[in-house]
Image (tube, rainbow, N blue to C red):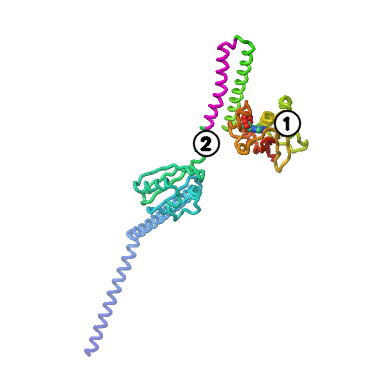
């Protein structure tokens, strides 16, 4: 009996406990559905949505910045790859961590990276500049001439603010130095060339003033001489103007289609009297059926006239001058060949320089500008000009004009 009572009480307790759990669960579910219905949860959802969209926009900003950085990096890499200045980055121990292709070329080092600054720079002044920068942490610069490499380099060493290494910038100033030398030589040559006729004009006029005027035959001789000097000066000034116009890129070509034979004949006609007076035979050797060339007739005729004029000047009476033209591959070759004094081997490569004259005592008159003008005129047509010569046997000046 007691036993049954205990079981009944236990069953009642279990039922009550289940009823109570059921009641609690219902309350929680109701509460939850009430909260879902009210704004509380929808606010939380909204916050989650806001958070998610903030994360999305953060991600897209990050992506954008990453791709901007990537393209900046690619642009910088292209610049470093293409610039003609050398760029080297060295660490505190002087080991090169980065070198652009120009740096490798300037220092003639195939792979400068991971090598030491001393090994790559290979010049004590340049290495010293790098050492000074490492010690003082201040910008240093140094210019050096490397005669064995025919180079003139300028090095700027900048301390790297983010590490204890340095950034080395190298500029090749070889071309600028060469241009400076050419300019300096030009000014000194020009002053010299002007001074000679001017001194002679001064002497002639002084002699006239000092009494030669009273002696008409002598006065005539002096005035003739003055005329010659003034003509030489005028020719020099004209040629200089022409040269400066050509060199400043103001050379415009008035092209027409011309048969090579017509060009040679026309130049020969202009110079025939001069050649005859000098006792020289002037001969045109050119077939009629050569391809026509598209040229500025006057300009190339002037080139030929200059070459013939030189041939006349440098060939003794009884000699010969031949004007030749022949077809080459995609070009016509023109040549002026003489049997004159010739040009020393070491001078052949220099005669196209401004003012260069082999031996001033050989010629008397002449400015040394004619061949450099001829070179410019031929090159403006896309051609080339050169000379071949054997001393005491003669010279041949050849130039090419493209036919296509
Ligand atoms: P120039 O006014 O002195 O003739 P160019 O520039 O025409 O100036 O020629 C430069 C120099 O080249 C001449 O002074 C001369 O020494 C040399 N030269 C040119 N043509 C000939 C030639 N046909 N024979 C020998 N030397 C020449």
Residue 317 is left or right of residue 250, and the answer is right
Give percent across and percent down for residue 238.
60, 25
Assess whether residue 137 is covered by the magenta stretch: no
Figure check: 149 above or below 198: below
Q: Residue at x 44, y 51 (%)?
A: 69
Instruction: Compare residues 46 and 233 and report the one nearer the observer.
Output: 233
Residue 248 found in image quarter: top right
Q: Secondary structure at mark 1?
A: loop
Q: Residue at x 49, y 50 (%)?
A: 104
Look at the picture and state if 58 lies above or below 392.
below
Q: Return the residue found at the far left.
A: 2
Closest to the observer, 259 or 104? 104
Q: Is residue 303 left or right of residue 17?
A: right
**199 within the magenta span:** yes
* Mark 2 → mark 1, Cα distance in angstroms: 40 Å
| Point 76% across, 36% down: residue | 286
The local secondary structure at tag 2 comes to helix
Identify residue for label 2. 179
Q: Pick the quarter of the image with the C terminus.
A: top right
Please state the extent of the stretch shown in magenta in the rendering: 185-213
The reply to whether residue 340 is visible in this rendering is yes
Which residue in the structure is indicated by mark 1?
319
Residues at circles 2 and 1 in contact by the CB criterion of under 8 Å: no
In the image, residue 299 sits, relative to residue 162, either above or below, namely above
Q: Residue 261's x, y, as percent?
A: 75, 33
Q: Residues within 10 Å of mark 1 (few under 14, many from 20)?
A: some
- Tell which quarter ligand 1 is in: top right
- Residue 179: % across, % down: 52, 36
Q: Earlier in the sequence, mark 2 or mark 1?
A: 2
Percent position of residue 347, x then y: 61, 36
Residue 203 is drawn in which quadrant?
top right
């Amino acid at each position: 009996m007691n036993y049954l009572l205990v079981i009944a009480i236990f069953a009642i307790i279990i039922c009550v406990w289940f009823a109570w759990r059921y009641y609690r669960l219902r309350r929680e579910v109701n509460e939850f559905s009430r909260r879902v219905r009210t704004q509380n949860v929808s606010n939380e959802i909204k916050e989650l949505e806001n958070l998610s969209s903030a994360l999305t926009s953060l991600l897209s900003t990050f992506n954008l910045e990453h791709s901007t950085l990537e393209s900046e990096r690619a642009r910088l890499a292209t610049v470093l790859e293409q610039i003609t200045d050398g760029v080297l980055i060295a660490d505190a121990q002087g080991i090169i961590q980065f070198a652009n292709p120009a740096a490798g070329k300037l220092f003639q080092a195939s792979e400068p990276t991971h090598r030491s600054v001393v090994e790559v720079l290979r010049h004590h002044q340049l290495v010293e500049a790098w050492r000074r920068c490492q010690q003082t942490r201040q910008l240093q610069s140094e210019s050096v001439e490397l005669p064995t490499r025919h180079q003139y380099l300028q090095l700027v060493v900048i301390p790297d603010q983010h590490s204890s290494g340095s950034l080395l910038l190298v500029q090749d100033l070889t071309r600028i130095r060469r241009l400076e030398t050419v300019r300096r030589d030009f000014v000194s040559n020009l002053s010299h060339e002007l001074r000679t006729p001017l001194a002679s004009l001064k002497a002639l006029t002084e002699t006239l003033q000092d009494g030669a005027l009273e002696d008409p035959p002598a006065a005539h001789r002096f005035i003739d001489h003055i005329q010659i000097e003034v003509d030489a000066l005028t020719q020099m000034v004209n040629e200089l103007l022409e040269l400066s116009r050509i060199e400043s890129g103001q050379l415009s070509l008035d092209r027409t289609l011309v048969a090579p034979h017509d060009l040679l004949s026309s130049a020969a006609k202009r110079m025939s009297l001069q050649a005859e007076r000098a006792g020289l035979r002037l001969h045109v050797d050119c077939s009629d059926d050569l391809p026509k060339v598209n040229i500025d007739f006057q300009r190339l005729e002037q080139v030929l006239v200059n070459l013939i004029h030189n041939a006349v000047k440098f060939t003794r009476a009884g000699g010969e001058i031949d004007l030749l033209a022949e077809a080459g591959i995609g070009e016509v070759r023109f040549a002026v060949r003489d049997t004159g004094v010739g040009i020393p081997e070491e001078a052949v490569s220099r005669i196209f320089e401004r003012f260069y004259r082999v031996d001033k005592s050989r010629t008397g008159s002449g400015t040394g500008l004619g061949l450099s003008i001829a070179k410019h005129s031929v090159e403006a047509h896309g051609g080339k000009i050169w000379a071949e010569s054997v001393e005491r046997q003669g010279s041949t000046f050849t130039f090419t004009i493209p036919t296509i």
